[in-house]
Image (spheres, grey):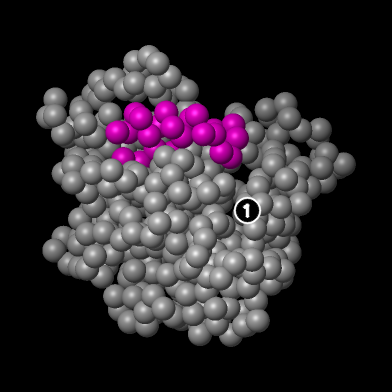
């Protein structure tokens, strides 16, 4: 039986050859293996890889609901104009400028607009969500708290994962991890352009067969937990392991049983897994789902954790995502690992102001925008040529705010 490594190399080689970026098999295949992260995120290859991660990595399925419930639909055009860079722009210009692959707008529980500019995209396409996965993990942690599997936000990492005792994460609480405030690592922890950054060690362990636990154990403590925001996928990996230990099952099984089934998801989702055995999902970055089903997650948050009259999240859990009330987590106060137009709370990026909207974010332009006051949820998947792009992010924020204003005006 073909190994996941062999299958991945074959898929990478075929894709790179088809797009003129590969050197053939043999030595070229080994080059692809060593440089796979760079190859799969290049344009235009990334439009394929971000919709076909299951061809490259081992996966664990999150089956669709046993009683799928499509969102009601009343599709119509969205002639929104927004201001950015000193001029007025259309939504078509947004999609072109920010490499949109999928875009869905839900207003008052009704799917009112849907478009798929991506080359391999469609209503049943499962998109790689990168760090938007973190916001899904936040929802799952809320469910585990509601059901008593996690005792409280004050539970320490070492309470659930004794193997992490003595590490920089041991004394961090569930709440610290939700707020990216574990105190572990420095501001260069997640510096993708730096080959020596810890996030790249983490990525190499995921794709090349190394040990995630060894990477985590090598991260030093730099400040006391709960005192500084430091964006870190490793924090959420630890939180995912805490969740799995608390509920006694892999995160994919828990997501299927507690979330996907209950919200009436229409399509199977999946987590990709590490190649090293025992394989593990990335609670901070390996969830793949359709935009329609992801919009249902946003709708759950917009409705304060209630779905079809059933409370799935603790009362006030969604409100926490609108702002933590901590000075170091407020908009513009996150420091060098944040963006100036965001704050942070419970694995969501906050927008502040009177509206107090919030969004899940993933590298290369993934958004799950939630505005509870307007009862609007917007999902945008993208294939940016770089992991981070402050201009594309700021333009997207301007456009999504304009969409909300347009819907509120009732036009």
- In this image, 397 relative to 184: left or right? left
| 249 to 269, vertically: above or below | below
- In this image, 260 relative to 156: left or right? left
**Mark 1, residue position:** 187
Q: What element does badge 1 sit on?
A: loop
Q: Residue at x 29, y 33 (%)?
A: 401
- Furthest toward the top, the residue is 87
Residue 299 visible = yes
Q: Callout 1: 10 Å neighbours few (<14), some, many (20+)?
A: some
Per the image, is 387 magenta? yes
Image quarter for residue 24?
A: top right
Q: Nearer the viewer, residue 157 or 30?
A: 157
Q: Quadrant of the N terminus?
A: bottom right
Instruction: Specify start and end residues of the magenta stretch as a single range.
Output: 377-401
Q: What percent of the width, then of the height, locates residue 337?
A: 56, 49
Q: Quadrant of the C terminus?
A: top left
Q: Residue at x 58, y 78 (%)?
A: 170
Per the image, is 307 magenta? no
Q: What percent of the width, then of the height, locates residue 265?
A: 31, 55
Residue 262 visible = no
Q: Nearer the viewer, residue 159 or 110?
A: 159
Image quarter for residue 276?
A: bottom right
| 40 to 119, vertically: above or below | below
Q: What percent of the width, then of the height, locates residue 356?
A: 27, 47
Q: What percent of the width, then of the height, locates residue 181?
A: 51, 63
Image quarter for residue 355?
A: top left
Q: Residue at x 65, y 40 (%)?
A: 40
| 83 to 71, vertically: above or below | above
């Amino acid at each position: 039986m073909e190994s996941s490594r062999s299958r991945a190399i074959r898929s990478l080689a075929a894709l790179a050859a088809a797009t003129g970026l590969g050197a053939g098999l043999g030595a070229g295949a080994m080059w692809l293996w060593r440089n796979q992260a760079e190859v799969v995120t290049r344009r235009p290859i990334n439009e394929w890889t971000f919709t076909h991660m299951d061809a490259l990595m081992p996966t664990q399925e999150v089956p669709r609901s046993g009683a799928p419930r499509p969102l009601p639909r009343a599709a119509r055009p969205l002639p929104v104009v927004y201001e950015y860079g000193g001029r007025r722009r259309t939504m078509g210009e947004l999609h072109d400028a920010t490499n949109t692959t999928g875009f869905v707008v839900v207003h008052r529980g009704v799917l009112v607009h849907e478009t798929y500019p991506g080359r391999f995209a469609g209503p049943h396409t499962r998109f790689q969500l990168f760090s938007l996965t973190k916001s899904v993990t936040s929802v799952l942690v809320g469910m585990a708290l509601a059901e008593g599997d996690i005792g409280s936000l004050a539970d320490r990492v070492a309470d659930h994962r004794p193997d992490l005792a003595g590490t920089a994460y041991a004394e961090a609480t569930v709440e610290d991890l939700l707020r990216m405030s574990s105190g572990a690592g420095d501001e260069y922890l997640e510096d993708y352009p730096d080959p020596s950054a810890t996030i790249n060690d983490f990525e190499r362990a995921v794709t090349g067969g190394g040990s995630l636990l060894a990477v985590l154990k090598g991260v030093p403590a730099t400040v006391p937990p709960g005192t500084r925001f430091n964006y870190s996928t490793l924090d959420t990996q630890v939180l995912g392991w805490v969740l799995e230990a608390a509920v006694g099952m892999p995160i994919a099984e828990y997501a299927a049983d507690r979330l996907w089934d209950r919200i009436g998801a229409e399509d199977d989702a999946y987590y990709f897994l590490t190649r090293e055995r025992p394989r593990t999902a990335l609670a901070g970055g390996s969830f793949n789902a359709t935009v329609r089903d992801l919009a249902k997650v946003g709708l759950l948050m917009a409705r304060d954790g209630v779905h079809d009259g059933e409370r799935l999240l603790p009362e006030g859990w969604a409100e926490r995502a609108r702002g933590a009330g901590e000075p170091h987590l407020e908009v513009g106060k996150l420091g060098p690992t944040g963006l100036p137009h965001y704050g942070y709370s419970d694995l969501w990026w906050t927008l502040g102001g009177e509206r107090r909207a919030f969004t899940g974010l993933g590298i290369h332009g993934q958004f799950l925008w939630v505005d509870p006051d307007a009862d609007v949820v917007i999902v945008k998947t993208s294939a940016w040529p770089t992991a981070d792009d402050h201009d594309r992010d700021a333009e997207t924020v301007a456009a999504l705010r304009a969409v909300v204003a347009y819907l509120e005006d009732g036009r």
